Image (tube, rainbow, N blue to C red):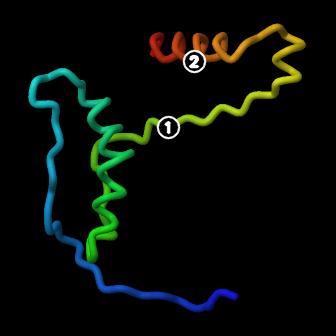
Amino acid sequence: MQRGGVQTSKSSGSFLMIVGIYSPDGRYDAEYVGNYANLYVLDALKRVPGANNASIMGTPDLAMRIWLKPDRMASLRITPSDIVQAVSAQKSAV
């Protein structure tokens, strides 16, 4: 059983800290670095006591989930590799 009710917490509208993440040798572009920060750094920051309101500014979330139906794919003679290629081609076209 879960306890019901409303939880409140004190917060401030001002920034306490801003962290910049970049690729020092230019090996990775801003999109890659932003996605890395979203996947690995943000969760670690949220685990710091008092920093549960951490967020990434200026970088959209790039995750995508694709559900495949093996029976439908077999009837169309499509492989998972074909789908990966189609998604990659669409990404390149944008």
Left or right of 6, for residue 24: left
48 over 93 or under it: above or below: below
**Kind of residue indicated by mark 2:** Val
Residue 23 location, quadrant: top left
Helix, strand, or loop for circle 2? Answer: helix
Helix, strand, or loop for circle 1? Answer: loop
> What is the CA distance from the residue labelled 1 to the residue labelled 2?
13 Å
33 over 6 or under it: above or below: above
**Kind of residue indicated by mark 1:** Ala
Left or right of 5, for residue 28: left
Q: Measured from the top left, where is residue 13 in percent x and y? A: 23, 73
Left or right of 86, for residue 39: left
Q: Measured from the top left, where is residue 38 in percent x and y? A: 35, 46
Which residue position is annotated with label 1? 63
Residue 43 location, quadrant: bottom left
Q: Quadrant of the N terminus?
A: bottom right
